[in-house]
Image: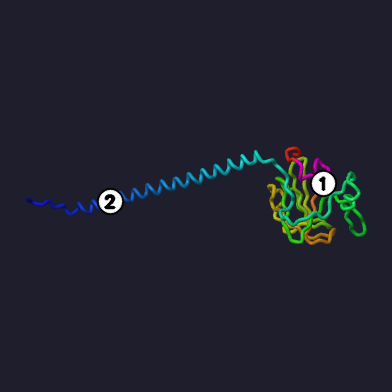
Amino acid sequence: MKKMKLRKYVLPTIYVLIILVTFLSVSLINNHLLKNVTNYNYSKSIMKDVTENVLSEILPDKFERPYLSENVKLLSGFYSKDYDDESQKNSLIVYQNTYMPSSGTFYASQDEFDVVSVYDGKVKSIKKDEMLGDTVEVQHSDNLTTIYYSLKDVTVRENDDIKKGTIIGKATSNNLVTDKNVLFIEVYLKGKQIDPEKFYELNPNEVK
């Protein structure tokens, strides 16, 4: 019986076909995996956006305090003729033997601390005050403005749009108080100065 012999080119052709099929299979699997990874990342991004939107609707909007550190303490409060005698006494500023009612609130810490915006807004101006150093004024709406005094290393510029919690600088010393790390903040609501400590408790949607 005569044995059949494969022609010389048959085996190499088979090897090439096997290699080609293997390569195509690997490529298809790889593309499928990459597609799944892309879809996963895309789905993850969508879920993040949805979660943030849902949380923003569930959680009540609020104003932030102008600092992040838990070591910051109230140094001197806001002066009001409607407050009791003790509160009024603690909200007087002594400068060159002269008593002045405080138009805002002083905060201080033994450690250097960041000063942040209490709410979304636009940086209206950056100035230097003779007694209180660098100041940043942020306009949150037509009715609401906050001014931050006694700053250094200011990180924002005029006309910047900033978010609640944006770091605008660091607290530093000034010529009104002896503490080293001090922030002084004023809050203007509808053109009138109000107590910052009471302001933080307000609903932003009611004062815009």
How many tags in the picture?
2
Pick whichever, 55 or 29, lies toward us: 55
Circles 1 and 2 in contact, beta carbons < 8 Å: no
Q: Is residue 53 left or right of residue 158?
A: left
Based on the displayed image, in which of its 4 quarters is residue 180 positioned?
bottom right
Q: Residue at x 81, y 59 (%)?
A: 174
Q: Which of marks 2 and 1 precedes in the sequence? A: 2
Point out the stretch of residues depicted in magenta: 187-202
Q: Amino acid at mark 2?
A: Ile
Q: Residue at x 80, y 49 (%)?
A: 186
Q: Amino acid at mark 1?
A: Asp
Residue farthest toward the left in the current orientation of the protein? 1
Q: Circle 2: is it few (<14), some (14-19), or many (20+) Cα within 10 Å?
A: few
Read off the residue under disc 1. Answer: 195
C-alpha separation, residue under disc 1 versus residue under disc 2: 80 Å
Where the C terminus falls, by quadrant? top right
Residue 44 locus on image (x, y percent): 53, 45
